[in-house]
Image (cartoon, rainbow, N blue to C red):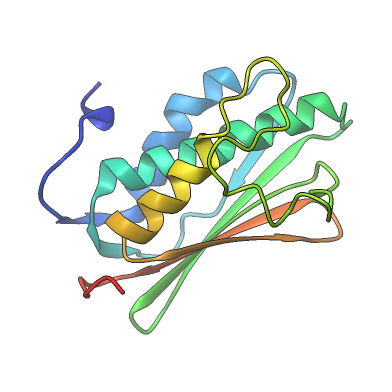
Amino acid sequence: MNFFKPTKEKKEFDLNTTIEYTLSIIKPLYKNNIEIIYDNSNVLRMTGFENALGQAIINILNNAKDILIENNITNKKVIITATKKDNTITLLIEDNAGGISEDIIDKIFDPYFTTKETQGTGLGLYMSQIIIHKYCNGTLKVFNTKNGALFEIILPTEERENN
């Protein structure tokens, strides 16, 4: 429960611990034989709002789960990688669900945009982008790969002014 409590102050934290905790929350929802692969061998310390970042990651992982199930993918996978270069951490979350239609890829971060007819509010990815930009001073982008959708989160390791 503490993970979802908003914090008012930025703090230094280990991104690996945050991702591992996030995965422990989401794995029970990842039924249907969805494999999550995460290499946590890098030391990834940063300053920011840990709980907010964890919520943004959960939103992305929930969408990946939903589309993997909806598209009836045989070997469902989500691959998470995190690397640090200089004062920047790059977090990549990729699924193998076939990608996002080019017709809508530019709209998925818009408020109230959803492809889920009855259960979606269209706020998950919108809020994730707000969290990453406003609270983490980072960027969130999405690309299609040969396998599926790739969400790229770029985060500063140290506090900086928000543009």
Q: Which of 11 and 59 is in front in this view?
A: 59
Residue drawn at point x = 79 percent, y = 45 percent: 96
State the quadrant of the N terminus: top left
Residue 103 sits above or below residue 138 on the image = above
Q: In which quarter of the image is residue 52?
A: top left
- Left or right of residue 155, residue 68 in this image: right
- Left or right of residue 11, residue 113 in this image: right
Task: Name the spot of residue 155 as percent of width and height, x first.
Answer: 39, 67
- Left or right of residue 46, residue 144 in this image: right
Task: Name the spot of residue 22 as percent of width and height, x first.
Answer: 42, 36
Q: Nearer the viewer, residue 27 or 95?
A: 95
Task: Name the spot of residue 89 as percent of width and height, x first.
Answer: 42, 69
Residue drawn at point x = 28 percent, y = 40 percent: 51
Residue drawn at point x = 69 percent, y = 57 percent: 106
Residue 18 sits above or below residue 21 on the image = below
State the quadrant of the C terminus: bottom left
- Left or right of residue 157, residue 154 in this image: right
Q: Which residue lies furthest to the left in this view?
A: 9
Q: Which of 162 and 150 is in front in this view?
A: 162
Q: Which of 71 and 114 is in front in this view?
A: 114
Residue 105 sits above or below residue 32 on the image = below
